[in-house]
Image (spheres, rainbow, N blue to C red):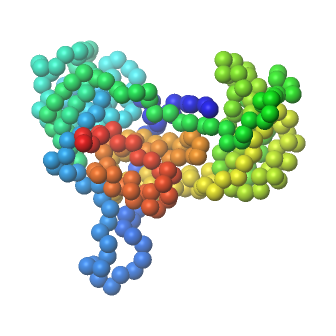
Amino acid sequence: MSRLVPATLALAAFWVSACGSGDPGAAGGSTSAAEEPAPTVSTPIPEQLYEADAIVLDDGEHGPMLCLGAMRLLLPPQCGDIPIVGWDWRVVEGEELMAGTIWGSYHVVGTFDGEVFTVTEVGQFERAGEPETYVYENPCPEPEGGWVAPEPEHNTQEDARRAYAYARSQPDYVISWNDHLDKELQEFSPVVFVAVFTGEADRHETAIREVWDGPLCVVERDVPTARKLASIRMEVEARLPDLGLQPLGSGTGGFPPTIYIDVVADAEGRVQALFDEEFGPGVVRLLPALRAVE
């Protein structure tokens, strides 16, 4: 099993494109407004407490801000997504000061009205567990005697480029990756080339064998193709503002492939439930930076 840290879940996350708009309501005609189902909108709950482990920064121009999304890895940091009310630098510890900017990493608890975070409690920054990772697990059973590369020096990820190019060119292509047989050698290691399609696995395996003689795993799965997943990602990103969500970053990865979208908050998981219903569970996964306190 390979575990890779996704770009969107790290500080160097790509910014989400929020252009365009979508219709958050249900499709279909209706004769009156009273008969139309209410659109799903993530409206904040005033009494709900949220928590987050984040950088708090004040550059002297806009006041204290929560940094929840991407930021430039410079000193002093350059970030700020949500204004904070009730912040007092005199009662916290661990702050740093440079060039008129003051910042520090904290665990904050408070309420969120959709625009402003009102802090009620401040503690030590403690990110629980390991960072979220994309997981790629070989879907093929290991052959008796294990995966064996006939020519280890010629069965590396570099040699698998032609197999990768073929797989990506197919309309029913889902995803492909290299499963390294020697985790220490990594890119210099022989690999199992793994390719997933929505159909015709035998035909694809025969075609890949023409350009790849190393260990191979080709399977069929009833999941969205790579092209369909890209289309869903664009649609979802465009709809987020109309659904009451503030996007922070996004990416696609893992197997089964999943669209991960970082957002500020999703009240009661309403939009997550909507996407699960529309696209199927696990296709789109929202990662709120502000987590509801139970």
Image coordinates for residue 255, horizontal then vertical, percent? 59, 43
Residue at screen point 29% across, 39% down = 290
80, above or below 227, in the image: above
Most extreme residue toward the bottom is 31
In this rendering, would 110 be left or right of 7? left
Residue at screen point 19% across, 46% down = 48
- Residue 124: tell me if it is visible: yes
Q: In which quarter of the image is residue 145?
A: top right
Image coordinates for residue 149, horizontal then vertical, percent? 82, 28
- Residue 244: tell me if it is visible: no
In this rendering, would 207 be left or right of 285? right
130, above or below 269, in the image: above
Residue at screen point 36% across, 67% down = 25
Q: Quadrant of the C terminus?
A: top left
35, above or below 186, in the image: below
Image coordinates for residue 277, horizontal then vertical, percent? 44, 61
Image coordinates for residue 22, horizontal then vertical, percent? 41, 62
Q: Quadrant of residue 217?
A: top right
Name the residue nearer the viewer: 45 or 98: 45
Name the residue nearer the viewer: 29 or 45: 45
Q: In which quarter of the image is the N terminus?
A: top right
Count of residue discs: 0
Name the residue nearer the viewer: 189 or 250: 189
Residue at screen point 49% across, 50% down = 282
